[in-house]
Image: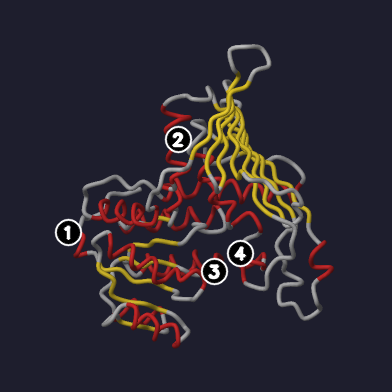
Amino acid sequence: MSKIKPYKSTADIKVAVIGYGGAFNMGKGHLEQCKAAGMTPVAVCDRDAARLKIAETDFPGIETYTDLNDMLKKSDAQVVIHITPHNLHYPLALQCLKAGKHVVTEKPFVLTTKEADDLIKVADKKKLMVTTYHNRHWDGWIVRAVEQIIQKGEIGQVVRVEATMGGYSMPRDWWRTSKTISGGILYDWGVHLLEYSLQLIDSKITEVSGYKFEGHWPDLMPKKHPWKNDCVEDDAHAMVRFKNGAWINLSISHLRTVSEPYFLTVHGTKGVYRMGWGGWLVRRPGKEAGQWVETTGPHPKTEPGKLFYENVAGYLVGKEKLVITPEWARRPIHILDLAKQSAEKGKAMAATYA
């Protein structure tokens, strides 16, 4: 990652977003977080004119564009945030980097290792920032887990991380159901769970195995369902092996029939640490044989999006190191890329990037 030319102040950093769609109101959220971090929102690009009208109401005086080329030519935005379907992250980010803009993509960074490599190479050559909105790096549950597990050694050496999410339901009728657009079932929450897990294992990745089952839900979909022939997997797993002997087992499923209150379970040599929506649980052996001691508590409250953009702003003015470097963002993508190849070839794949 090359050194960039810093701005004089955060207010000098002008930002734009591509995509102001209604899903999760993410366009507005990103610009508000940028503004809270001291940066200046100046433009929005979206093909939907109705959404641009909403952006003009949300941010009076903001420039609006329906064409990215026009925005890159006419707007003085220096940072472009990509809030688009996953398969568009790479081509649009590449276009913006070549136009001399710093880039923030929504997660996942891109869909393949090669795409990540290409963006890193172009950004380095042009001395530009490229990063990914891994705001959940600052979620209260993982912040506390890192403190307790890594810094304080609460459960000893980490042996295994089990990351699970899903339910029993047909994939929804939206673009995340499309494998070619989304990348597959592991590319949404799976990226978050991998990013959490990678913070908890301080070792190099050696190999990845992937597993998938597909065809159940498409067989039940109506003939006119838009993603019937391009549906994400029904069930998918990635097994990540590390040099120190630890491993991650990631599982995302539309065939999960058992309700699981915890989405991350970290097994250590001295106990287990579990994270769920409602809080954390630690289970350790007691003083007597067969005795176990459990402690639970709520997660600390944080403002992940604000903290992400405060770090980006601090980096762009030369006062902080970038936390979510493109090399860091590439790690979960490399894992998912190898898992996909492994599932197709029926064998483990050696890691290129540790």
Task: Kindly identify which residue carries mark 2.
Answer: 146
Few, some or many residues within 10 Å of mark 1 (<14, 14–19, 20+):
some
Residue in the image at 72% along x and 66% along y: 231
Q: CA distance from mark 3 to mark 4?
A: 7 Å
Q: Which mark is residue 85?
A: 3
Real-space Cα distance between discs 2 and 4?
29 Å
Question: In the image, what residue occupies the spot 45% across and 87% down?
Answer: 50
Q: Position of residue 94 (x, y in %)?
A: 43, 65
Name which of mark 3 and mark 4 comes first in the sequence.
Answer: 3
Q: What residue occupies the far top of the structure in this picture?
A: 288
Q: Is 99 drawn above or below residue 347 in the view shown?
A: below
x, y percent for residue 84: 50, 70
Q: Which mark is residue 182?
A: 4
Classify 10 Å Cα crowding around label 3: few (below 14), some (14-19), many (20 and above).
some
Q: Is residue 241 above or below residue 225?
A: above
Residue at 49% across, 37% down: 297
49, 259: nearer the viewer: 259
CB under 8 Å between callouts 3 and 4? yes
**Residue picked out by circle 1:** 9
For marks 2 and 3 on the same chain, the one whose residue lies earlier in the sequence = 3
In the image, what residue type sits under mark 3?
Pro
